[in-house]
Amino acid sequence: MGNSDELRDIQEMNDSGVDSTPEIVSVSTKHPKDDALQARIEQLAPILRDVLKTLGEDPTRAGLQKTPERWAEALLTYTEGSAIDPEEHLNVIFKLEDDDYPVGSEDMIMVDNIAFTSTCEHHIAPFRGVAHVAYIPNPTSKIVTGLSKISRVVTLFSRRLQVQERMTQQIARAIDKHLKPMGVIVVVQAVHFCMIQRGVEQQSSSTITTARRGIFVSKPQMETRFLDYLRTRKESNDNGVLA
Ligand SMILES: [Zn+2]
Protein backbone atom coordinates (compact mmCIF):
# COMPACT_ATOMS: atom_id res chain seq x y z
CA MET A 1 0.00 0.00 0.00
CA GLY A 2 2.98 2.28 0.67
CA ASN A 3 3.68 2.54 -3.02
CA SER A 4 0.21 3.62 -4.00
CA ASP A 5 0.05 6.17 -1.18
CA GLU A 6 3.29 7.61 -2.39
CA LEU A 7 2.01 7.68 -5.92
CA ARG A 8 -1.09 9.55 -4.81
CA ASP A 9 1.11 12.10 -3.06
CA ILE A 10 3.17 12.62 -6.17
CA GLN A 11 0.02 12.97 -8.22
CA GLU A 12 -1.48 15.52 -5.88
CA MET A 13 1.70 17.55 -5.95
CA ASN A 14 1.64 17.36 -9.70
CA ASP A 15 -2.00 18.34 -9.91
CA SER A 16 -1.55 21.32 -7.64
CA GLY A 17 1.11 22.65 -9.94
CA VAL A 18 -0.38 21.76 -13.27
CA ASP A 19 -4.11 21.41 -13.07
CA SER A 20 -6.39 22.47 -10.26
CA THR A 21 -9.68 21.25 -11.74
CA PRO A 22 -11.67 19.04 -9.37
CA GLU A 23 -11.54 15.28 -9.76
CA ILE A 24 -15.18 14.83 -10.73
CA VAL A 25 -15.79 16.96 -13.74
CA SER A 26 -19.07 18.05 -15.15
CA VAL A 27 -18.12 18.61 -18.73
CA SER A 28 -21.01 21.05 -19.02
CA THR A 29 -19.38 23.50 -16.64
CA LYS A 30 -16.61 23.98 -19.17
CA HIS A 31 -19.13 25.04 -21.79
CA PRO A 32 -21.53 27.66 -20.48
CA LYS A 33 -24.72 28.09 -22.44
CA ASP A 34 -23.10 30.35 -24.95
CA ASP A 35 -24.49 31.68 -28.20
CA ALA A 36 -23.28 28.72 -30.22
CA LEU A 37 -25.04 26.27 -27.92
CA GLN A 38 -28.22 28.33 -27.94
CA ALA A 39 -28.12 28.39 -31.74
CA ARG A 40 -27.86 24.62 -31.89
CA ILE A 41 -30.76 24.24 -29.45
CA GLU A 42 -32.86 26.51 -31.62
CA GLN A 43 -31.90 24.52 -34.70
CA LEU A 44 -32.80 21.19 -33.12
CA ALA A 45 -35.98 22.13 -31.26
CA PRO A 46 -38.36 22.38 -34.28
CA ILE A 47 -37.12 19.03 -35.54
CA LEU A 48 -37.78 17.43 -32.16
CA ARG A 49 -41.19 19.11 -32.02
CA ASP A 50 -41.96 17.33 -35.31
CA VAL A 51 -40.79 14.07 -33.79
CA LEU A 52 -43.28 14.55 -30.95
CA LYS A 53 -46.04 15.23 -33.47
CA THR A 54 -45.11 12.15 -35.46
CA LEU A 55 -45.38 10.12 -32.27
CA GLY A 56 -48.99 11.26 -32.08
CA GLU A 57 -48.40 13.78 -29.31
CA ASP A 58 -49.72 17.29 -29.05
CA PRO A 59 -46.58 19.42 -28.58
CA THR A 60 -48.71 22.36 -27.42
CA ARG A 61 -50.01 20.60 -24.32
CA ALA A 62 -48.64 21.97 -21.05
CA GLY A 63 -46.18 19.16 -20.27
CA LEU A 64 -44.58 19.21 -23.71
CA GLN A 65 -44.39 22.91 -24.51
CA LYS A 66 -40.74 23.30 -23.55
CA THR A 67 -39.76 19.68 -24.15
CA PRO A 68 -38.14 20.18 -27.58
CA GLU A 69 -35.70 22.78 -26.18
CA ARG A 70 -34.97 20.68 -23.09
CA TRP A 71 -34.56 17.56 -25.21
CA ALA A 72 -32.24 19.39 -27.59
CA GLU A 73 -30.07 20.64 -24.75
CA ALA A 74 -30.00 17.17 -23.20
CA LEU A 75 -28.93 15.58 -26.49
CA LEU A 76 -26.17 18.16 -26.89
CA THR A 77 -24.96 17.42 -23.35
CA TYR A 78 -24.94 13.67 -23.95
CA THR A 79 -22.76 14.17 -27.00
CA GLU A 80 -20.56 17.10 -25.98
CA GLY A 81 -17.54 14.80 -25.72
CA SER A 82 -17.54 14.56 -29.52
CA ALA A 83 -16.04 18.03 -29.74
CA ILE A 84 -13.39 17.35 -27.11
CA ASP A 85 -10.25 15.31 -27.51
CA PRO A 86 -10.20 13.14 -24.36
CA GLU A 87 -6.60 12.30 -25.02
CA GLU A 88 -5.38 15.80 -24.25
CA HIS A 89 -5.81 14.98 -20.56
CA LEU A 90 -3.22 12.25 -20.95
CA ASN A 91 -0.62 14.85 -21.83
CA VAL A 92 -0.42 15.59 -18.10
CA ILE A 93 2.32 13.17 -17.23
CA PHE A 94 5.10 12.80 -14.73
CA LYS A 95 8.01 10.50 -14.26
CA LEU A 96 8.60 8.11 -11.40
CA GLU A 97 12.12 8.05 -9.96
CA ASP A 98 14.25 4.97 -10.57
CA ASP A 99 14.03 4.01 -6.90
CA ASP A 100 10.25 4.32 -6.92
CA TYR A 101 9.75 2.12 -9.91
CA PRO A 102 12.45 -0.55 -10.21
CA VAL A 103 12.92 -2.20 -13.60
CA GLY A 104 11.18 -5.55 -13.73
CA SER A 105 8.68 -4.82 -10.98
CA GLU A 106 5.75 -4.89 -13.42
CA ASP A 107 3.70 -3.04 -10.81
CA MET A 108 0.24 -1.99 -11.76
CA ILE A 109 -1.58 1.33 -11.45
CA MET A 110 -5.28 0.70 -11.27
CA VAL A 111 -8.32 2.96 -11.11
CA ASP A 112 -11.50 0.98 -10.65
CA ASN A 113 -15.20 1.63 -10.48
CA ILE A 114 -15.21 4.72 -12.68
CA ALA A 115 -18.91 5.39 -13.15
CA PHE A 116 -20.11 6.68 -16.51
CA THR A 117 -23.29 7.20 -18.50
CA SER A 118 -23.10 7.06 -22.26
CA THR A 119 -25.52 7.00 -25.19
CA CYS A 120 -26.01 3.99 -27.45
CA GLU A 121 -25.66 5.18 -31.02
CA HIS A 122 -28.06 2.57 -32.37
CA HIS A 123 -31.06 3.59 -30.26
CA ILE A 124 -30.04 6.97 -28.74
CA ALA A 125 -30.71 5.43 -25.34
CA PRO A 126 -28.46 5.57 -22.29
CA PHE A 127 -26.16 2.83 -21.19
CA ARG A 128 -24.46 3.19 -17.87
CA GLY A 129 -21.95 1.33 -15.83
CA VAL A 130 -18.43 1.28 -14.51
CA ALA A 131 -14.98 1.04 -16.03
CA HIS A 132 -11.95 -0.53 -14.42
CA VAL A 133 -8.61 0.54 -15.85
CA ALA A 134 -5.08 -0.61 -15.08
CA TYR A 135 -1.74 -0.04 -16.72
CA ILE A 136 1.85 -0.99 -16.09
CA PRO A 137 4.20 1.94 -16.74
CA ASN A 138 6.91 1.72 -19.31
CA PRO A 139 9.99 0.46 -17.39
CA THR A 140 12.31 2.76 -19.34
CA SER A 141 10.39 6.05 -19.48
CA LYS A 142 8.59 5.43 -16.12
CA ILE A 143 5.92 7.83 -17.34
CA VAL A 144 2.59 7.89 -15.49
CA THR A 145 -0.41 10.19 -15.57
CA GLY A 146 -2.55 11.69 -12.82
CA LEU A 147 -5.07 9.23 -11.39
CA SER A 148 -7.92 11.65 -12.07
CA LYS A 149 -6.94 11.82 -15.73
CA ILE A 150 -7.88 8.18 -16.20
CA SER A 151 -11.42 8.75 -14.95
CA ARG A 152 -11.67 11.92 -17.01
CA VAL A 153 -10.76 10.04 -20.17
CA VAL A 154 -13.51 7.49 -19.42
CA THR A 155 -16.04 10.30 -18.82
CA LEU A 156 -15.17 12.13 -22.01
CA PHE A 157 -15.27 9.06 -24.24
CA SER A 158 -18.69 8.27 -22.76
CA ARG A 159 -20.07 11.70 -23.76
CA ARG A 160 -20.53 10.67 -27.36
CA LEU A 161 -22.81 8.51 -29.37
CA GLN A 162 -21.15 5.23 -28.58
CA VAL A 163 -21.11 1.49 -28.62
CA GLN A 164 -19.65 -0.09 -25.50
CA GLU A 165 -17.16 -2.23 -27.43
CA ARG A 166 -15.64 0.77 -29.19
CA MET A 167 -15.56 2.93 -26.07
CA THR A 168 -13.62 0.23 -24.22
CA GLN A 169 -11.07 0.04 -27.01
CA GLN A 170 -10.78 3.83 -27.31
CA ILE A 171 -9.87 4.14 -23.63
CA ALA A 172 -7.20 1.46 -23.91
CA ARG A 173 -5.82 2.87 -27.14
CA ALA A 174 -5.58 6.41 -25.72
CA ILE A 175 -3.60 5.23 -22.70
CA ASP A 176 -1.45 3.00 -24.87
CA LYS A 177 -0.69 5.83 -27.29
CA HIS A 178 0.13 8.54 -24.76
CA LEU A 179 1.85 6.68 -21.92
CA LYS A 180 3.35 3.88 -24.00
CA PRO A 181 2.98 1.58 -21.01
CA MET A 182 4.16 -1.99 -20.76
CA GLY A 183 0.49 -2.88 -20.89
CA VAL A 184 -3.02 -1.61 -20.31
CA ILE A 185 -6.31 -3.32 -19.58
CA VAL A 186 -9.81 -1.87 -19.56
CA VAL A 187 -12.93 -3.69 -18.39
CA VAL A 188 -16.31 -2.03 -18.83
CA GLN A 189 -19.53 -3.37 -17.38
CA ALA A 190 -22.79 -1.68 -18.33
CA VAL A 191 -26.54 -2.01 -18.56
CA HIS A 192 -28.19 -0.85 -21.76
CA PHE A 193 -31.54 0.84 -21.46
CA CYS A 194 -32.31 0.25 -25.13
CA MET A 195 -32.42 -3.45 -24.28
CA ILE A 196 -34.14 -3.12 -20.91
CA GLN A 197 -36.86 -0.78 -22.16
CA ARG A 198 -37.53 -2.79 -25.28
CA GLY A 199 -37.75 -5.95 -23.21
CA VAL A 200 -34.84 -7.62 -25.00
CA GLU A 201 -32.82 -7.99 -21.84
CA GLN A 202 -33.57 -8.91 -18.26
CA GLN A 203 -33.18 -6.07 -15.75
CA SER A 204 -30.30 -7.83 -14.03
CA SER A 205 -28.32 -8.58 -17.19
CA SER A 206 -25.23 -6.54 -18.02
CA THR A 207 -22.65 -6.43 -20.78
CA ILE A 208 -18.93 -6.75 -20.12
CA THR A 209 -16.31 -5.69 -22.64
CA THR A 210 -12.54 -5.81 -22.33
CA ALA A 211 -9.61 -4.25 -24.14
CA ARG A 212 -6.04 -5.36 -23.53
CA ARG A 213 -2.71 -4.18 -24.87
CA GLY A 214 0.91 -5.23 -24.40
CA ILE A 215 1.80 -7.44 -21.48
CA PHE A 216 -1.87 -8.05 -20.66
CA VAL A 217 -2.05 -9.94 -23.95
CA SER A 218 1.36 -11.60 -23.93
CA LYS A 219 1.40 -12.61 -20.26
CA PRO A 220 -2.01 -13.90 -19.14
CA GLN A 221 -1.06 -14.01 -15.45
CA MET A 222 -1.04 -10.18 -15.49
CA GLU A 223 -4.75 -10.23 -16.27
CA THR A 224 -5.22 -12.72 -13.41
CA ARG A 225 -3.44 -10.28 -11.08
CA PHE A 226 -5.67 -7.47 -12.27
CA LEU A 227 -8.77 -9.57 -11.62
CA ASP A 228 -7.42 -10.50 -8.16
CA TYR A 229 -7.07 -6.79 -7.32
CA LEU A 230 -10.61 -6.17 -8.54
CA ARG A 231 -11.81 -8.97 -6.26
CA THR A 232 -9.86 -7.51 -3.32
CA ARG A 233 -11.49 -4.19 -3.97
CA LYS A 234 -14.93 -5.75 -4.05
CA GLU A 235 -14.29 -7.54 -0.76
CA SER A 236 -13.07 -4.31 0.88
CA ASN A 237 -16.19 -2.62 -0.41
CA ASP A 238 -18.44 -5.42 0.88
CA ASN A 239 -16.74 -5.15 4.28
CA GLY A 240 -17.33 -1.41 4.39
CA VAL A 241 -13.64 -0.49 4.19
CA LEU A 242 -14.05 1.54 1.02
CA ALA A 243 -17.75 2.27 1.17
ZN1 LIG B 1 -28.88 0.26 -28.20
Image (cartoon, rainbow, N blue to C red):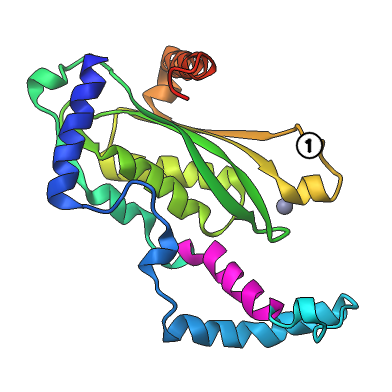
| x, y percent for residue 31 | 39, 71
Between 154 and 67, which is closer to the camera in this rendering? Answer: 67
- Badge 1 is on which residue? 203
| x, y percent for residue 241 | 43, 17
Residue 240 visible to the viewer: yes
| Residue farthest right in this picture | 56
The stretch in magenta equals 67-81
- 172 vs 144, left or right, is right
- 131 vs 21, left or right, is right
Classified by dominant secondary structure, the portion drawn in magenta counts as helix
In the rendered image, which quarter is residue 122 located in?
bottom right
Task: Say whether residue 68 is magenta.
Answer: yes
| x, y percent for residue 52 | 80, 78
Task: Say whether residue 88 is magenta.
Answer: no
Q: Quadrant of the N terminus?
A: top left
- Name the residue located 76 percent from the left edge and 51 percent from the top edge: 194
In the rendered image, which quarter is residue 28 located in?
bottom left
Q: Secondary structure at mark 1?
A: loop
- Name the residue located 54 percent from the left edge and 83 percent from the top edge: 40
| x, y percent for residue 229 | 43, 16
Amino acid type of the residue tagged 1 in the rendering:
Gln
**222 w.r.t. 212: above or below:** above
**119 w.r.t. 230: above or below:** below
